[in-house]
Each structure stands twice: as structure tokens, then as C-alpha cells.
Image: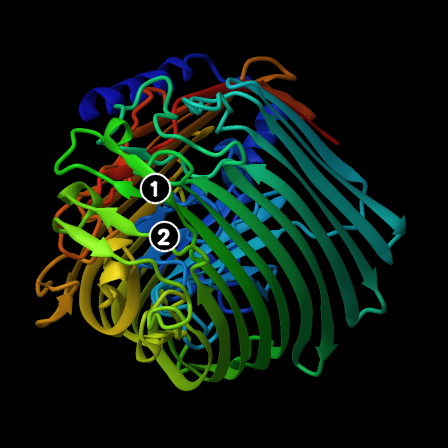
Amino acid sequence: MQKLKMGVCGTLLATSMLGMPVVSAYAAEAAANQDDVLIVTARKREETLLEVPMSIAAFSEKFLEDLRVNSLEDALQYAANVDFDDFQNDSFSGSIAIRGVVRLTDVEEPGYGLYKDGVYIGSSVVGLDEFTDLARLEILKGPQGGLYGRNAIGGAINVITNQPVNKIEGRFAVTAANFDRQEYRGTINVPIIADKFFVRINGFLIDQDGGKAVSSVTGDQLDAVHSAGLRGQAKLLINDDVDVTWTAEWLDADQPAAIILSSRTTPPGENEGALVYSSEHGVKRDVLHLYQTLNWRVGEGTFTNIVSFRSMDVDSRTGFAPFVGTGGAVRQSEQDNWFVEARYVSDRGEDFDYVVGLNYINESNDFYRILNLPIGVVPDNPPALPPNFINLGTLSPITSATTDTRSWAGFVEATWHVSDKIDLTGSARYTNERKTYDFFVETPSAIPFFGTGADIGVGAPIFFPGFQLQGAPWFMDRNVKKSWNNFSPQGTLSYRPDDKNNIYARIATGFKAGGFNNEASRAEDIPFDPEKSLTYELGYKGLWLDDLLQVNLSAFVTKRKDAAILVADPAPIFQFLGVSIVANGGKTITKGVEFDFLAKPIKGLELYGALGYLNAKFDGSQLISGVNVDGNFVPQTAKWSYSTVATYRTPVSDALGLFTQASYSSKSGGYERPDNALRLEHADLVNFRLGIEADAWRITGYVDNVFDDRVKLSQRTNGMYILSAPRRFGVQLEYSW
């Protein structure tokens, strides 16, 4: 079947490549686009991708637009050795794994650093905003302890938006798609004062009323989406040496929570709401982000100061499975984040250049959750819970917590140009981080709790008497403080025999911040410490065939120490409720290879491909939930990842051109949990686009997931899972000036 899909993908592309080239203004523009060189800022300075001695997946604005990439999740499928898992789909527990560095629960910090226009975004509450008006996306792989520091243990992600410019330009796009979905996106750039003051505004509106999932009880549409966002930017050129850019962003998103299914209820079909969901099932997210960037040419370099304030409120209401009835969960988070960075980047010198800086993070996160758990009697080994469940009431444990984080860091990176072919680069960062955690857990209900049978995860019979906060050791009111220091060095040796080839060797370290469990039954289990990583990497980058083929190859070994792992809480009632806590002690060794290429074999045709291999295993005897995982694969990490994109443009007249694109992406191998009991399932995704375009407009028809390949994601041992996205198709009209 996989060969058939790839064959169809190739056929779709080949059928659109029929036709003779026509010399025209459109053709000249298409040829000019082939000569574009992608500039990246991975090392805080503008460089070509070839010049940077590290593994980077970098995607240009045109590449992202052609693929209709509107979110980080959309883009990650085209990067080797990068995985995405979002069991809750609620901005609490989304996990991006770069090179096998996995985030297993929402109380952990992410294992990567997420930056937008140089502003640190990543935190324990992940907010993956909609992409609008992007200039490019950079995924830096491997520890980035020097320049990026906090949480960049697996890598870092740079999201770079287009900036205000000194000309009038704009773009508007409208999309109509299945599931009653409409999208409206627009950008306008205007110089208010020529050569002095420019303004850029862009926004989007997404409205979807249909979908595949409907509650079998309430009849509510669970896939509905209603989201809107707006970004305004103003840039002032104070003089030839100083410029300031102010940015304000607003997001109001109502989106579906994960549609959680269970193998013990109704098999998935057209009605995927096989379980009972609250009428409020879904996620609401409000984001306000304000930041200022100052650039000042001083001496032989540029001083940059960034000041950012970001506020995000998330309200998630989710039906609870596998129980049926009044079960559900309410999760709320209010997060305020201040980020300040000051750095000086020297010009590239003949012998020496450097980057030096300081940054500070002040973050407050208020978290509230209430679980409504149906309580009752379940006969032994029932075929399905609903008809056999005898409801005796509702148990409603409440968790309320506030986490305050103060983190400051100093960093430096210096490159010595040993000769015109050899560079030696060293970097280091010192970080001091303090966290304060105030939390309160209570259970207002005081009713008997009965249950039997393996279907609810415990032995039979069991009995837990009614309990409340007073006198119950597993519910508490506490204040915990922790502080950590970290020093992260790295070094790189780069050899460039000519301007077309770069061979490098790299040693890098990184760390992921520690944190607190919000459901631990014992005080000593509440905090957990940071984890650290060490990577050895060899790589090659080259331009071949008169720059028509660019290749990137890297091989690496990464060792993680004190890795965060999930273990069962020792309290019986917590084990009954399926509560796991984060603990340190995991050791892993990851060996991997990454390869990608970008080829332009003939005029109008662009080919991209990426291949990744990961062998990420636990190292040494260590128990996770009573299982010795020595030699087991690290969970949520695919062994193989591969993708390819073929884009072809050809003129059909003096004014019109044909645009077509076929893409394929998939993964294989890997396991859901550390015990390796459940294998990961991966969809084979084939996407297709076909359009007509002119200098100022384009109309495109698209199909995502052509074969409607849907697999189980985020499977749990209790039979719960979610399904991957269904086939989507639509038409998009774009106009630009």
C-alpha cells in the first residue's frame, strides 16, 4: 500500500509537468526564485545555511506557503528526526521531540527552546500559535546550550515573521474547504513616513462548523473551530544606526480538544464521538503578546535589546474516558511571561568574531483543574463499561497550583578563523534558575469508592473509604522552592575546503529545567531536577552540480543524564486513578543519522527530501513503574522518519503559470511507553496541490491526506487513543500586490 501511495504521488506530479516552456515575465520570475539563497540566523547573525556548522532544517516563506503550512505541527512532518504528540490537544500537553528528547507529561518543561523573532516562548504550558506572515522557520537539532540555553536539550526552533519594510505591499487569501471550513488571511504593509516609519498588519479568521466527531449523547459537534488572530508591527528608523520595532499580537481561539476514543466502547466510524462528552468539550485560548526590539550599530557590531510580555489564558473542558456519565475534566491556566535579552553581535572579522549577551525570564503560571470522576460498582471483566456501571456519585478532586520562575543567564560564543578554511567556535552559558511552587489539592466528596476488575486498572476486589483533605496524607497544601545552576559549554571545528563544502565536528551540551509534580502523594516526590545532555556530532554540507543540488548529512550520539521519566505514584488511590509522577534517574543513549537535500534539476522543478534514523534506548538497569527498561526504546520516538516534496511550475501563457505539488511524509518504528508494550502507529500522508498563478494572484485546489489514512495516536494501556486527522480538501484564492 505504501508503494502504491508513493507511486500515485509521483503520477500526480508527472501529469502536471506536461507542456512546453514559454518565455514570459512569469517564467523569468520563476527562474529568479530558483536562485534565491536561504539566509538563517541560527547563530544570532545572518548566514547562509551552508555556512552554519550544525544540523538545521530550514524552510523558506515560499516553501511554507506552497505546502499551506499554518502551524508548527504542519511543518514538523517535513523535518527528519522530529516528532509531535498532542494527546490532549489543549496547549497543555503538546510535545515536540527533537532527536528523541521527549516530553512525557504537562508538568515537564519542553525539551526544546521555542523562539519567535528572538523572543523565548517555550514553557511548561505550551502555546503553539497559528502561523501568519512567516519569513522562515528554522529547526536547530541537537543541544543548543550556548546561545539558546534553557530547555534546548534536544534543539531549538526559530519562528521568524516578516518585518515592516519601506514599500506598499499586501496579500489576501480566502479558503473554502470540507467540514464547512472557511479561512481568511490578510497582510498589508504601508510606509507611514517614507524611509523612516513603516507599519505592517496581518490577521486571520478561521471558522469550521463541521467535522467527523459528534457526541453520541449531546449531539454537539466536537470538531468545530472558531479562531481569530491579529498582529501589528511598527518599525522606526531613528537614524542610520538605530531602529526600533514594536509588535503587538492577539489570539482568540476556540478549538476542539482531543477526541478520545476507547477500544472498549464503539469502534471508530463516521461518528467518532463514541464516548460521552460534555457540551463544553473543547479548548479556548486567549493570547496577548507585546514585544519591542531595538537594534543599534555600535563600533564593529550590533547591540540588540528585546523586551517581551506575553499573557496566555487556556480553558480546556474534556469528556473523561473510559468512564461514562458525568465524567469530565476542566483545566485552566493563566500564564504571564516577561522576557528580556541584551546581546552584542560583532561583525564578521578577518580573524575573530563573537556574540555576548544576557537574558532574564520571569514567568508566573496559575493552574487549576477539577476532575469529575463517576464513582460506582463495576462487575468483574465487563465487556463494556456503560451498561454495567452502577453510578454511586461523583468524586471531584481539585488541584490548584501557582508556579513562579525566575531565570537569568549569561552567554558567549566566539569563532576563531584559524585560516581561510578552518574555523574553531566555542560557546558557553551559565544559568541560574529559581522556582516556587504553591499548590493545594482537595477532594470535596466524601462518598464510598467501590470498584473491581482489570478494566479499571486495579485488582479485584477493592474498597476505598470516603476521604477529604483532613486526615488524608495524599492531599496537601504546600509551598516548595528549588533553585538550580547550570553551565553549558560547546565547541565546533569547521573545515571548508572551498565555498561549496563544509565539514564539521561538534560537541554540545544542554539542559532542561526541573519542575514540580502537581499530583504527588508524598512531599519528597513533588520536585524533580533538571536533566542534562551531551552530544557528539559529525556533519557535512555541500552544494553540487553548479548549486542545483544542496545536501546536508549528519551523524550523532547523544547521552542524556537524569532524564525525566514517569513512574507510578506509591499511594494506592493514586494508582487506581492512574496518576503517574515525574522522577529523575533515566539514562539514555541515542544514535542517529539525518540527511536532507534540495534539488532543482530543471527549470521550474524543485525537489526536497529528508530522511532520519534514531536508535534511542534506555541505558543501564532502571525501573519505570516497576519495569526494568534497560535496552528498551525511548517512548514517543520514531525509529525512521522520511518525507519528500516535489514542486513544479511552468508557464502556460505570457501571463499565467501552472503550479503543482505532491508531498509524502511518514514515520516507522517506535513505542508509546517505556515498557515498549504498545507500538506507535504512523499515517502515510500524501498531499496534493494544483493551481493556476499569475504575478498578482493564484487559485489552488488542495487535498491533504489523499488516502484518508487514519491511525491510532497516543494509545494508552487502558484502551484510550485518539485518531489522526482525516482527509481535508478545499480551494484557496490568493491575491497580492
Count of marks, rendered view: 2
User: Picture coordinates of residue 152 (x, y %)?
Assistant: 41, 68
- Identify whether 31 is placed above or below 585: above
Quadrant hosting residue 538: bottom left
Q: Earlier in the sequence, mark 1 or mark 2?
A: 1
Q: Quadrant of the C terminus?
A: top right
285 or 488: nearer the viewer: 285
What residue is shown at x 29% (from left), y 42% (from top)? 376
Q: Quadrant of the N terminus?
A: top left
Q: CA distance from mark 1 to mark 2?
A: 8 Å
Question: Given the image, on which type of amino acid does mark 1 rest?
Answer: Leu
Q: Mark 1–mark 2 contact, CB under 8 Å?
A: yes
What residue is shown at x 51% (from left), y 24% (from top)? 220
User: Picture coordinates of residue 714 (x, y %)?
Assistant: 29, 43
Label 1: element kind: strand
Label 2: element kind: loop
Relative to residue 378, is residue 699 drawn left or right?
Answer: right
Badge 1 density bin: few <14, some 14–19, many ≥20, Cα 10 Å: some
Location of mark 1 (residue): 392
Location of mark 2 (residue): 447
What residue is shown at x 9% (from left), y 65% (from top)? 630
Which residue is at the far right? Answer: 193
User: Picture coordinates of residue 419 (x, y %)?
Assistant: 40, 80
Question: Given the image, on which type of amino acid does mark 2 rest?
Answer: Ile
Picture colour scheme: rainbow
278 or 640: nearer the viewer: 278
